[in-house]
Image (cartoon, grey):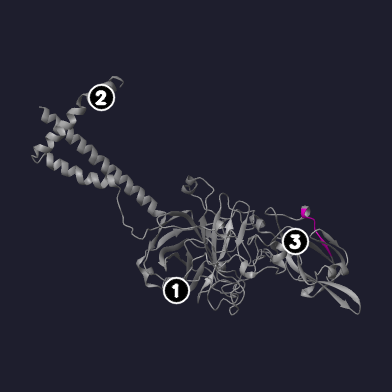
C-alpha cells in the first residue's frame, strides 16, 4: 500500500514537473516570438569587411534575413508631406577586425517620388526659406545689421545677451558675417560682407554693405569707431548677424507640406536613432514613435539619443552627389583636417575610406538636436571641443585636428533598379565604442557604446526627399530592440526546460519499468518529509 502511494505521489510530482516545463517552455517560446517581432539581431560574421562602394554587396549579407520594419508618418495629416515610406528593411551584422569590433547596419527602402542626387534648401509652401540662419551660442559677438532701404548701407551694433533670441537655451539663430575696414585715400571705411535679408537671401545682392555706424562689444570692450576696430586687431573678423522674425524649425507645427517639384527637391535620408536612456525601461514597450516634436528645433519628447543621419547631399558617396566635399566635409583632395587619437582603435580608419560617405552625427534631448563634431554653424546647435568658444570657431582660431571627428560612422548609398521598383540601399559602419576618439574631450559621452550580448533600443526613419519630405516630415518606426549576438552564440532553452524534459520521462520510465531500487530510494527520501508534508497540508486545509 505504501509503495502504491509513493508511486502515485512520485507520478504526481513528475506530471507537475512536465506541466511546469511545458508551460514555462510555451511561455518562453511565446515571449521569444513576441520579442522576435520587434528585435533585430546583429549576427556575428567572422572576417567580414565592408564594401561601401556597393552597400549590401558583400556575400555575408545574403546569409542574413531582412527584418521588415513598418513606418508611420511623423505628421499624420491627410494629404500632408509625411508618411510616403510604409516599410524599411533592415539587416545587422558585426565582426572583429584586428581585434576591434565593428557594427554593420543595412537599410533598404523603395523610392517614392522624384530621383535626384541634388538637394535644395527647404522652403515653405509659399516659397519662404525653411531656416536661412545657423544656430550659434549666444554671446557678445552677436550683432544686428540694420540696413537702409536700398540695402547699400547699414548700422552694425551688438545685441545684449538678454535680448538675443535663445532657443534652445543658450543658443541663438544667427548668420556669420565678416566686418572689414579699408583705408580709402586716408579715410577709414567699414564694410560688412555676407549679411542676409530676413528670408535668407543675400543683403545688397551679395555686394559689400557700407557701415555708417558701429557699436560692438568685443569681450567686454565697447568699440564705436573703425580706429578702435583696427587697433584691436579685429580687421576681417567674423561676427554673428542676429536673426529677427525668421522662419524657425519650431514653426513646422504650422505646416503640413513643403514646396518641391521635379527640379527642386530635398535629399534622400536614412536615419538610425539610438537610445541613450533617461527614461524608464517600460517606456519603450508602448507604441511610441520617437520623432521630433513639432514646435521645437528637433527636441525629443523624453530621454536622450544619438542620431545617425545619412543624406545623399552632401554626405553620400556617389560621384553624382555634387555637394559631397569629401569624407571630412572640406575637400575631396585636401589632407584630412582631423586625426584619430592613439587611444581610439579603428583599424579601418573610418572617415577616410575609399568610396565612403559619412553621416550627420547628432545628440538629441528634450531641448534640441545638437550636431556632434565637425565644423559648427551648419544649421543646428553643435557639440564640439569645449576648449573653443563660438568666437574662436567663427574666426578659425583653433587647430582643426583638435575638433571632434564627425567621421566615425562610414556609409555607403546606392540606387538599385529592380523588377518591383527602384530601391535605395544604405549601409552604416562604426566601431562598437568611440572612447578616445576625441582625445578624452568627451565626444563619446554623446554616442552609443556597443557590446556583444547586449540589447539596445533603436528606431529607424526614411525621408523621401523626392516626394517633399524633409526636416520633421518623414516616416519613422516604433522603438525596436537590436540584439548583438555573442561570437560563440547558440539558441539555448533555459535549463529548467532541458532538465525537466529530459528527466521527467526518464524518471517515469524508470519507475514504471520495474526499477524498484529507484522507488525505494525515493521512498526513503519521501518518508523523511511525510509527516511534515501531511501536517502542512492539514493546516492549509483548515484555513480553506
In the displayed image of the protein, which residue is found farthest to the right?
A: 186
Give the position of the C terminus as an image quadrant.
top left
Q: Callout 2: few (<14), some (14-19), or many (20+) C-alpha neighbours within 10 Å?
A: few
Q: Earlier in the sequence, mark 2 or mark 3?
A: 3
Spot occupied by residue 110 in the image (x, y as percentages of width and height): 47, 67
In which image quadrant can residue 440 be found?
bottom right
Q: Earlier in the sequence, mark 1 or mark 3?
A: 1
Q: Which element type, helix, strand or loop, lies under badge 2?
A: helix
Q: Which circle, 1 or 3, is nearer the viewer? A: 1
Find the magenta span and give its range.
Answer: 156-161
Residue 379 as seen in the image, left or right of residue 238: left
Above or below for 35 versus 111: above
In which image quadrant can residue 525 be found?
top left
| Residue located beneath label 2 in the image | 537
Give the position of the N terminus as an image quadrant.
top left
| Residue located beneath label 3 in the image | 243
Say whether marks 2 and 3 touch (CB < 8 Å).
no
In the displayed image of the protein, which residue is found farthest to the front?
A: 342
Spot occupied by residue 12 in the image (x, y as percentages of width and height): 19, 34
101 magenta-colored: no
Residue 256 seen in the figure: no
Q: Identify which residue, 415 or 105, lies in the foreground.
A: 105
Q: What numbered label is drawn on residue 51?
A: 1
Spot occupied by residue 401 in the image (x, y as percentages of width and height): 61, 69
The residue sitting at 41% across, 64% down in the picture is 94
160 magenta-colored: yes
Spot occupied by residue 471 in the image (x, y as percentages of width and height): 60, 62
Q: CA distance from mark 2 to mark 1?
A: 69 Å
Residue 31 seen in the figure: yes
Amino acid at each position: 500500500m505504501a509503495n502504491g502511494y509513493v508511486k502515485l505521489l512520485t507520478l504526481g510530482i513528475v506530471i507537475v514537473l512536465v506541466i511546469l516545463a511545458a508551460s514555462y517552455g510555451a511561455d518562453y517560446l511565446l515571449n521569444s516570438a513576441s520579442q522576435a517581432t520587434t528585435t533585430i539581431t546583429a549576427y556575428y560574421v567572422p572576417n567580414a569587411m565592408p564594401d561601401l562602394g556597393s552597400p549590401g554587396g558583400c556575400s555575408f549579407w545574403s546569409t542574413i534575413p531582412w527584418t521588415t520594419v513598418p513606418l508611420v508618418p511623423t505628421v499624420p495629416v491627410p494629404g500632408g508631406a509625411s508618411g510616403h515610406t510604409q516599410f524599411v528593411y533592415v539587416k545587422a551584422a558585426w565582426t572583429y577586425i584586428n581585434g576591434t569590433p565593428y557594427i554593420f547596419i543595412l537599410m533598404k527602402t523603395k523610392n517614392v517620388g522624384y530621383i535626384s542626387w541634388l538637394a535644395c534648401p527647404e522652403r515653405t509652401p509659399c516659397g519662404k526659406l525653411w531656416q536661412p540662419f545657423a544656430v550659434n551660442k549666444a554671446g557678445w559677438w552677436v550683432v544686428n545689421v540694420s540696413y537702409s532701404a536700398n540695402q547699400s548701407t547699414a548700422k552694425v551694433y551688438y545685441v545684449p545677451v538678454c535680448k538675443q533670441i535663445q532657443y534652445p537655451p543658450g543658443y541663438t539663430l544667427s548668420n556669420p558675417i565678416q566686418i572689414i575696414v579699408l583705408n580709402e585715400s586716408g579715410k577709414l571705411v567699414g564694410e560688412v560682407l555676407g549679411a542676409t535679408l530676413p528670408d535668407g537671401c543675400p543683403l545688397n545682392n551679395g555686394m559689400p554693405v557700407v557701415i555708417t555706424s558701429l557699436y560692438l562689444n568685443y569681450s567686454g570692450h565697447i568699440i564705436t569707431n573703425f580706429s578702435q576696430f583696427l587697433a584691436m586687431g579685429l580687421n576681417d573678423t567674423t561676427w554673428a548677424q542676429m536673426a529677427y522674425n525668421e522662419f524657425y524649425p519650431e514653426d513646422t507645427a504650422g505646416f503640413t507640406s513643403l514646396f518641391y517639384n521635379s527640379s527642386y527637391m530635398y535629399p534622400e535620408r536614412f536615419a538610425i536613432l539610438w537610445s541613450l536612456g533617461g527614461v524608464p525601461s517600460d517606456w519603450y514597450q508602448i507604441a511610441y514613435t520617437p520623432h521630433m516634436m513639432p514646435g521645437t528645433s528637433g527636441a525629443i519628447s523624453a530621454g536622450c539619443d544619438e542620431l545617425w543621419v545619412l543624406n545623399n547631399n552632401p554626405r553620400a558617396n556617389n560621384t553624382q552627389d555634387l555637394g559631397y566635399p569629401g569624407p571630412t566635409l572640406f575637400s575631396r583632395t585636401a589632407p584630412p583636417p582631423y586625426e584619430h587619437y592613439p587611444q581610439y582603435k579603428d583599424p579601418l580608419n573610418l572617415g577616410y575610406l575609399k568610396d565612403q560617405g559619412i553621416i550627420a552625427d547628432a545628440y538629441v534631448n528634450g531641448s534640441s538636436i545638437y550636431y556632434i563634431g565637425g565644423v559648427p554653424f551648419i544649421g543646428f546647435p553643435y557639440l564640439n571641443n569645449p576648449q573653443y568658444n563660438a568666437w574662436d570657431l567663427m574666426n578659425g582660431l583653433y587647430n582643426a585636428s583638435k575638433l571632434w571627428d564627425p567621421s566615425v560612422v562610414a556609409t555607403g548609398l546606392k540606387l538599385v533598379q529592380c523588377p518591383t521598383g527602384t530601391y535605395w540601399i544604405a549601409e552604416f559602419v562604426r566601431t562598437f565604442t568611440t572612447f578616445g576618439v576625441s582625445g578624452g574631450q568627451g565626444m563619446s559621452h554623446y554616442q552609443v557604446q556597443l557590446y556583444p550580448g547586449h540589447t539596445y533600443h533603436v528606431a529607424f526613419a526614411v525621408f523621401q526627399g523626392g516626394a517633399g519630405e524633409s526636416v520633421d516630415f518623414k516616416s519613422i518606426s516604433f522603438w525596436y530592440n537590436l540584439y548583438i549576438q555573442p561570437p560563440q552564440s547558440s539558441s539555448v532553452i533555459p535549463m529548467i526546460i532541458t532538465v525537466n524534459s529530459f528527466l521527467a520521462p526518464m524518471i517515469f520510465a524508470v519507475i514504471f519499468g520495474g526499477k524498484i531500487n529507484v522507488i525505494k530510494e525515493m521512498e526513503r527520501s519521501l518518508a523523511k518529509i511525510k509527516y511534515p508534508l501531511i501536517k502542512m497540508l492539514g493546516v492549509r486545509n483548515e484555513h480553506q
